[in-house]
Amino acid sequence: MRKVSQCLMSLTPKVMKLPKEFNKIKDPVQWALHTFQLNIKHSTLQITHPSSDKENNSEGEISHINSDHPGAFTTFANGVNYGNPVHGRLELINIIAGQGKAKDGAQLVYKPLQKGLVPVLEKLHPLGYFVRASLWLSSGNHRYSAHCDAGDGLLFHLSGRKTVRVWPTPKALQQSALFDFSNLEERMAEDYIDFNLKPGQVLFIPSGAAHEVWAKGEDPAVSVSFHSGSTYPILHLCDSLNQSKDKDIFSLPEKFQGTRKKTTTFFEPSRFIPKGYEAPEDIPQSLQDMLKETLIAKDINEQELDAALNQWWQETMANKSYPGDFIT
């Protein structure tokens, strides 16, 4: 896992060899089906219905399979076994600030995470971090349209054929301290790179990089994705500062007040700590300046504002009170 974990310090998409820990999954399709069966009510299932509009190469209409229905797993498993166009996602692991658990059947994924990735994440994100792992199982061709993810992504490809198109994040956006995912077109301004993944490969997708995924052919495609980082909702920071003062002193411009993935504005605390160094005792000046430019403060002078931000930094660093990101 060493080479895989090292890429988390990079902003460049990259393909690597699957770590040996994942070779324990001898039959990825059967393992994936069994894991879905154990957790079917927690999964998201889709089926694509053939389109009658052949002239315009329409991909068909996608509908959801009700995962609470008693026959949901049978419908999904039959689609996989007969090469029909079905797609499933199951969150295996969700850990925020060190708290969380793995779903049934996820142990083969959880052990490599604990052994290989967590020690690296603890060094990269000394104020706390989130990490999520999801299981993806598709057959009969499936396209996941262009989107961005919060945090760095590692796609461990175990079975079938999958093409991932990645748009490297433009330099102007790499240098921005604040970001959200509403500017998708701007994030797709650079020339894309297509990665044709084979079983036994891992693709690294940097935080905020636009990408889309195709599972190709009738053979089932199985992948496990890891997403990790320290993306911190600036709205949560504002709320925390107000709670410390017991009154509403701090607010944000309207555009920063969203609470859904595509409208929430984040900043990454770890980006303000030089790689390989311990987090400073006081808030880094560059982070302090950025937050002061963003926050609206009333009935408070600049010295009090600096003190409030420094107190937030010290409490967050001491308690790892990282809230995670807003995903709904």
Image (cartoon, rainbow, N blue to C red):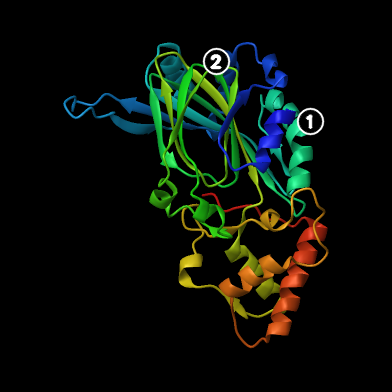
Residue 94 falls in image quadrant: top right
Residue 68 vs residue 262, the one in the foreground: 262
Is there any visible trace of residue 70 in the rendered image?
A: no
Secondary-structure class at tag 1: helix
Q: Earlier in the sequence, mark 2 or mark 1?
A: 2
Mark 2 or mark 1, which is nearer to you? 1
In-image side of 297 versus 184 (left or right): right
Label 2 and label 1: CA atoms lie apart by 24 Å
Residue 159 falls in image quadrant: top right
Q: Position of residue 16 (x, y in %)?
A: 62, 25
Disc on res. 41: none
* Residue for badge 1: 115
In-image side of 51 versus 18 (left or right): left
Q: Residue at x 24, y 29 (%)?
A: 58
Q: Residues within 10 Å of mark 2 (few under 14, many from 20)?
A: many
Q: Residue at x 67, y 27 (%)?
A: 106
Q: Residues within 10 Å of mark 1 (few under 14, many from 20)?
A: few
Query: Which amino acid lies under the numbered mark 1 shown in the image of this protein?
Result: Lys
In-image side of 240 versus 63 (left or right): right
Q: Position of residue 284 (x, y in %)?
A: 74, 65
Query: Which amino acid lies under the numbered mark 2 shown in the image of this protein?
Result: Val
Q: Residue at x 76, y 77 (%)?
A: 307
Is there any visible trace of residue 30 in the rendered image?
A: yes
- Please state, as top left, top right, bottom left or bottom right, where the N terminus lies in the image: top right
Disc on res. 29: 2
Q: Residue at x 70, y 23 (%)?
A: 108
Q: Position of residue 309 (x, y in %)?
A: 71, 72
Secondary-structure class at tag 2: helix
Labels in figure, total: 2
Q: Position of residue 310 (x, y in %)?
A: 76, 71
255 relative to 128, above or below? below
